[in-house]
Amino acid sequence: MDGEVEAPPLQGAYTTVVATTLGDDESRNKGEWTSVQDVPIEHDALNRCIYAVREVIRSYRAAFEVPCALPSYELLDIYIPFQIASSAVITQDPDGYSLDASDWGPVSLLMLDHANTPNTPKGPAIDSSNMERLDYFDSLKDLGSPLFVWRERFVEARRALQVEGQYGAAVTLSNTASEVLLDSLLSNVMWESGKDPADVAGVFAEGQLARRVKSQFSEHLGGSWVLDGNDPVAEWFHRCYKVRHRVVHGGHSPSRLEAQIAYDAVLRLSEYCWDRLAVKRKKFPRTALMMLARDGLQRRGKWCSFMKHFSSKVAPSEGSWLRESQKWREDVQAVLMSRQ
């Protein structure tokens, strides 16, 4: 094409933020960080800049009630321009401090590591190999099953953490997912045990999840369900459950690392729940098949002759376990509501 082409001007409102930070701690690469986002601000220049801008906007939002998004690593463009100066001059004036340097290097681009990009794969294509799985979760959704709600909240927690960079939301959603998971698992094994909803409704009283965990799960599923120590249940309680309490009731603004730890704690808790259910599969075969299915039992080496026989000979002759267990849970909630 001959001649020059003039690019059209940018349309709409946009903001360019320039932030400067001093130096970079040599211990940055000595920590056991799982991702660059987790490096504490005292060890990473970019994370310090993001933190500083975030703190200003937090004050701005509160002062003027503007519902703008808080900046985070995950919400930045995938490329960030930067310059490095070998020396800097800091001067003080009546308005505070200013940072000047006369030997800024060339502008370079830093490529960030996050999932907030337009071409990120969204998931597997739907075909004959996974249609049955999709149909199963669709039926869970239509029934309003807590099994579906648990997965949905967990995915939302992952999005808040990895895509949106909303760390407080990631903590609260992670904990919500864990509470739904725990209550769903407990209600299912009680339903399969033939418990009368009126007799056990008090166990599911609101605000008593920690008490339920300590008093009920070991009886039904075995294993360790104490809230102190290093096992998955205790880690969840201290790293997610209690952090969520600080976020919701104390206004705590968690770091990305806190949110990641909370999310990981719920993931480990869920695996522990599934492992315990697999061990107790002969006691709760219906719950095991609903929550783990054949694939989950096979991965844990628990797809035994008993489960094969139960799945092929007993299960087809019974009604819908999903509907029956959901009806049992609704009866429990009705009893609780009648006692208020």
Image: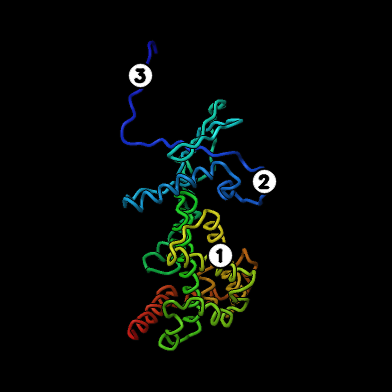
Mark 1–mark 3 Cα distance, whole angstroms, equals 55 Å
Packing grade of label 3 (10 A; few <14, some 14-19, many >=20) is few
Q: Secondary structure at mark 2?
A: helix
Identify which amino acid the numbered label 1 is placed on. Arg
Q: Earlier in the sequence, mark 2 or mark 1?
A: 2
Mark 2–mark 1 Cα distance, whole angstroms, equals 25 Å
Q: Which mark is residue 239?
A: 1
Identify which amino acid the numbered label 2 is placed on. Ser
Q: Which mark is residue 64?
A: none
| Quarter residue 217 falls in | bottom right
Check disc 3 and report the residue beneath it. Answer: 6
Identify which amino acid the numbered label 3 is placed on. Glu
Q: Residue at x 61, y 79 (%)?
A: 222
Check disc 2 and report the residue beneath it. Answer: 27
**How is the structure coloured here?**
rainbow
Front of the two marks 3 and 2: 2
Seen from this angle, which residue lies furthest front? Answer: 94
Q: Residue at x 51, y 84 (%)?
A: 193
Packing grade of label 2 (10 A; few <14, some 14-19, many >=20) is few
